[in-house]
Image: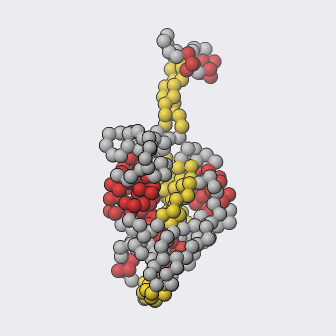
């Protein structure tokens, strides 16, 4: 059982998520993408931010642009003041991983939960390279865990550490045969949390298979979208296994069973999610470099 939990594609390895920075930086973008570089090095990416931030508020001096006169400060002090603004480029990105029991399966390269974490890591590295801040949230059957938004490399290291610890915990609980827990096992609590935690202008990236998102999930997504952007990474198999019988490792209780594939890919009924969100299919069987290209093509990072 211990060996099964440590197998490639089952365990979530921090070193591999850190190494995905290279794939994120050098991912191919679509033709015509206009980008700028926020800092030396790395990959030029499109700048995103929360809007405008205050650059300076001071007394007027001859030569200042009269269009920058600030009426409130001038009226309050009786002395003309000018207020200038600059682009806020420190965009905050929330990386939200669905680690519920419905994500703990896979047919080819990796568990869906592992593929979700990899896709989020690619998104996070691109956000960091663009000068943004990242925060991570892990959803399990027992509740939520998260990190505070933070910039530069340390922000990603904090998020990767959280995802690896949370994933290890859900694997161990699944191996012990523990149930759904007390939170109900839906996405609604996480989406409601993000309405409070994610600032205006932030980008929320949720990676899930969207099995049983929960009653009220659409309404909760719409709440997130009121002041933020929402990207839904849909982790789903796109190809069927060749017909035949396959051995399957069981986490709960250990042991093996067999499963017969018919060669027909099961197409899950899509969850009813708001049209305002960007929806991006992610194949867990695809190599991370290919997933990085798909993410880069969205232009969100």
Residue lying furthest top in this view? 62
Front one among 34 and 4:
34
Identify the residue shown where x is 48% and y is 73%.
Answer: 239
Q: Is residue 110 above or below residue 220?
A: below
Q: Is residue 34 above or below residue 184?
A: above
Image spot of residue 84 (x, y percent): 51, 25
Front one among 284 and 17:
284
Q: Is residue 86 above or below residue 101?
A: above
Image spot of residue 74 (x, y percent): 60, 18
Model colouring: secondary structure
Identify the residue shown where x is 45% and y is 68%.
Answer: 284
Q: Is residue 70 left or right of residue 2?
A: right
Image spot of residue 82 (x, y percent): 54, 20
Q: Is residue 204 above or below residue 168?
A: above
Q: Is residue 128 left or right of residue 83?
A: left
How many numbered circles does the render carry? 0
Front one among 137 and 182:
137
């Amino acid at each position: 059982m211990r060996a099964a939990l440590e197998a490639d594609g089952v365990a979530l390895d921090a070193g591999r998520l850190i190494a995905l920075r290279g794939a994120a930086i050098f991912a191919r973008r679509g033709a015509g993408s206009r980008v700028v570089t926020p800092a030396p090095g790395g990959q030029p990416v499109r700048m995103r931010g929360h809007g405008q931030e205050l650059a300076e508020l001071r007394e007027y001096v001859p030569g200042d642009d009269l269009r920058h006169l600030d009426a409130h400060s001038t009226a309050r002090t009786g002395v003309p003041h000018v207020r200038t603004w600059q682009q806020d480029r420190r965009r905050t990105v929330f990386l939200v991983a669905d680690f519920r029991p419905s994500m703990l399966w896979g047919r080819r390269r990796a568990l869906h939960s592992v593929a979700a974490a990899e896709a989020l890591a690619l998104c996070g590295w691109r956000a960091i390279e663009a000068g943004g801040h990242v925060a991570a949230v892990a959803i399990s059957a027992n509740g939520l865990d998260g990190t505070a938004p933070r910039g530069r490399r340390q922000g990603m290291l904090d998020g990767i550490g959280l995802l690896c610890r949370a994933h290890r915990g859900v694997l161990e609980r699944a191996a012990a045969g523990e149930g759904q827990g007390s939170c109900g096992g839906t996405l609604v609590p996480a989406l409601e949390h993000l309405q409070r935690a994610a600032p205006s202008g932030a980008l929320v990236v949720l990676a899930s298979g969207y099995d049983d998102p929960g009653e009220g999930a659409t309404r909760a997504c719409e709440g997130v979208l009121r002041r933020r952007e929402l990207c839904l990474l849909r982790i789903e198999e796109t190809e069927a296994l060749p017909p035949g019988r396959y051995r399957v490792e069981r986490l709960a209780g250990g042991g093996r069973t067999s499963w017969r594939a018919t060669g027909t890919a099961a197409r899950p009924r899509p969850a009813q999610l708001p049209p305002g969100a960007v929806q991006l299919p992610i194949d867990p069987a695809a190599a991370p470099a290919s997933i990085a290209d798909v993410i880069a093509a969205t232009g969100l990072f």
